Amino acid sequence: MTENLKVEVVGLNRVKGKHLVVQVRLSNTGTDKHLSWPGEMGDRTRPLGEIKWASGIGVLDAQARAWILPYQPADSPCLCSDLNRDGLSRFIDPGQSIDVYAVLPAPSGNPATTTVTTPVGPPMLNVPISDEAPTGDFPDPDAEPVTPVTRRLILPSESLDKSEETADDGKDLQVNLSSDVLFAVDKATLAPNAKSIIARTAKLIDASPATVVTVAGHADSTGNDAINDPLSLRRAQAVQRALSAQLSRDSVDFQAKGYGSRRPLYGNDSDEGRRRNRRVTVTFPKPLPAAQEPVATASPDTTGATGLTGTTKADGQPIAMEVSGLRRLPGGLGLLTYKITNQGSAETWFTDLHHAQDWEAYKYQAASNVRVTDVAARRQYLPGRLEAPTGNGADFYCACTDVSGVRISTEKFAPGQSREFWTLFALPDTAGPLKVKIGPFRDLQIPIQ
């Protein structure tokens, strides 16, 4: 995302079986100006005053659905390279390099490889982990009190008819059933077409180890609490009764609650946001994976097939897009990477990448206007979300390229300039290609690598 900044992983070492030391080399490949690196490498999910140094270096623990970042000591934003502790300059001279590091928890399962993440480009896959001692002098996380910093990765998807939206964090499923589909306006009696929606959710509960299921009713902000609170509770109770009647086992307890308009998922200042906030949320442990044959994926050379491109215009300038890969990761994850190029003769802004229907769900703007669709299953997959706990709840960030803060110029392209963007999704267990929609570009059929 930053011109002339080259990022290389030069060391990845597991220490004491539980910590990870990540060493990254930053190079200024330009010839005419200094390059400031602390803001570039800072973690965007921390308070603004702490987005600095190498706090954005991390790894993706796909099996645990966690984005792991450097430990946080009591007196510092992160256990990582900083300007004072390590005597580093804020700038990298043209043609020069510096090495920075981060110390963080090792990913679960003692893997031989992992995915390394930085704020300046797509995740780097299959980086080997060494169990040899790292070369260099690095702080010991066992020598002082430190706090692990992880961001839960939530993978949303929705049915194409908009009747339900599911968020999977690797542990629990949260199924948001649309109240507009389930109920008539201001009513708490299930509509006839709600039966199939309830049946699908009941089947998921049956397949899970759930002993307790929470059913929560929610409203938008158009009514007052005297109306919204009892209505949301009655709707939750109606869904609870319908689910209980369709379960094939009787060892499940339900807890029904009504929250009115106090827990919106989206902004209430648009019709789409209000529609999504009118919901009944069913939460339970994730169903156990069914025994099945391994999924056959497309061979890697299929990503060189023709037709993975699209064109549009921005302020009269031709803009080209090319998908560089849709790769399957462990834990049901997928990584989509694509390149945007200004093929015109003048500088232009291309802002369609962040104009997504659910942009209100994120704290900051990101290139979230991307959808992956399994046409056969009639299911659409949305970009993953990183959950960062706050004192008042949580903030959510797109698990995709950031286009705000220090990245605010990411959507500005000089003539001939290209940038590679990325997005993490859930991927269905299918061997066939998936439909991918990126911003205003045409639909593409993308093979899974």
Image (cartoon, grey):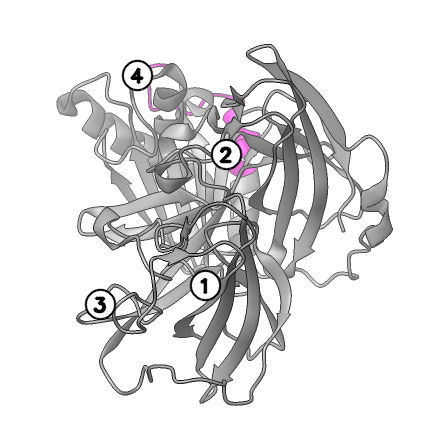
Instruction: Please tell me which of labels 3 and 1 falls first in the chain.
Output: 1
Type of the residue with mark 2: Ser
- Say which of marks 2 and 4 sits in front: 2
- Say which of marks 2 and 1 sits in front: 1
Mark number displayed over residue 186: 4
Magenta segment, prevailing SS (helix, strand or loop): loop
Q: Measuring from the top left, give residue 117's x and y in whole percent.
A: 51, 58
Q: Kindly state the secondary structure of the residue where label 3 is placed.
A: loop
- Say which of marks 3 and 1 sits in front: 3
Instruction: Please tell me which of labels 2 and 1 falls first in the chain.
Output: 1
Q: Kindly state the secondary structure of the residue where label 4 is placed.
A: loop
Q: Measuring from the top left, give residue 19's x and y in whole percent.
A: 43, 80
Please give the residue where the numbered disc 1 appears in the rendered image. Answer: 58
**Relative to 134, 269 lies left or right:** left
- Say which of marks 4 and 1 sits in front: 1
Type of the residue with mark 4: Asp
Residue in the image at 49% along x and 85% along y: 134
Residue density around tag 4, few if under 14, some if 14–19, many if 20 or more, within 10 Å? few
Q: Nearer the viewer, residue 87 or 291?
A: 87
Would residue 22 be counted in the magenta stretch? no
Type of the residue with mark 1: Gly
State the extent of the magenta-drawn residues as a range: 185-199
Check if mark 4's residue and mark 1's residue have beta carbons within 8 Å: no
Q: Measuring from the top left, give residue 311's x and y in whole percent.
A: 70, 21
Instruction: Please tell me which of labels 2 and 3 falls first in the chain.
Output: 3
Q: Residue 88 occupies which quadrant of the picture?
A: bottom left
Residue in the image at 62% along x and 49% along y: 335
